[in-house]
Image (spheres, rainbow, N blue to C red):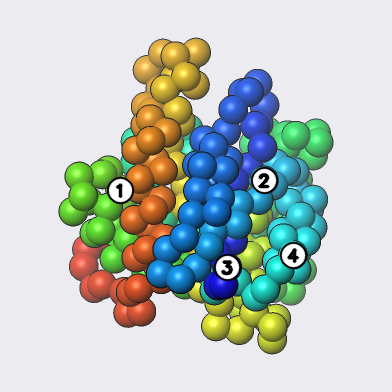
Amino acid sequence: MLRILLSGFEPFDRDTVNPSWEVAQALDGWQVEGATVQAVQLPCVFGAVLERLDAALADGERPVLVVALGLAGGRTEVTPERAALNLDDARIPDNAGQQPVDRPVVADGPAAYFSTLPIKAIVHALRSQGLPASVSNTAGTFVCNHLFYGLMHRLATRSDLQGVRGGFVHVPALPEQAARMPGMPSLDLATQVQGLRILLHTALTVQTDLREQGGSLH
């Protein structure tokens, strides 16, 4: 059985829930196009998150697809990320109290990596099913970007992972989080799970991404 590795983060800061993990956990064991989802929870901690990623990559057969999820509080859509920067620049501490400033994720690594997911086809598929989605051109410079860059570096440089597609997707807050922070956009869990089902199916079945507008002025 082919394996899809789907990661989500542990709760961060004062939250008791993280939608990225709730979505991943809900899809654990789901089968699509002959592949089975294996969900893994990752720590919201610089460095440790990549150690846990390495353990998950080694825990079973070589995956055909690796998708990392993270929370983007304030966003209104499911947003596949386009590029990961080789930069840690934390505005706030991680769950271990670390707050790196202007530090590379990988010393002497390239400045950036692009996702190898068909991000525009994913957005198109989600929108065609009535789900809010858009391409994002920045994953920030916190632990989400740290994980995204570390993942893409591994897929690009490890011979045992050559040909594995991967990328990062930000999801909105859940309604219970927005209830504690009035005015914060949110998207219910069932809709997010539905969106990720479409996303994973598209990532497995679309080999050449669409060429359509997905850029941003800012």
Residue under label 2, please give it. Answer: 41
User: Disc 1, disc 3: CB below 8 Å?
Assistant: no
Element type at marker 3?
strand
Q: Is residue 118 above or below residue 9?
A: below
Mark 1 Cα-neighbour bin, 10 Å: few <14, some 14–19, many ≥20 = many
User: Where's the N terminus, which quadrant?
Assistant: bottom right
The amino acid type found where label 4 is placed reads Asp
Element type at marker 1?
loop
Q: Is residue 139 above or below residue 108?
A: above
| Residue 70 seen in render | no
The amino acid type found where label 2 is placed reads Gln
Residue under label 1, please give it. Answer: 133
Q: CA distance from mark 4 to mark 2?
A: 13 Å
For residue 3, which numbered disc appears in the image? Answer: 3
Residue under label 4, please give it. Answer: 59
**Which comes sooner in the sequence, label 4 or label 2?**
2
- Does residue 208 appear to the left or right of 109 in the view shown? left
- Nearer the camera: disc 4 or disc 2: 4
Q: Quadrant of the rendered structure where residue 38 is? A: bottom right
**Which comes sooner in the sequence, label 4 or label 1?**
4
Q: CA distance from mark 1 to mark 3?
A: 25 Å
The amino acid type found where label 1 is placed reads Ala
**Which comes sooner in the sequence, label 1 or label 3?**
3
Residue appearing at x 63%, y 65% in the figure: 151
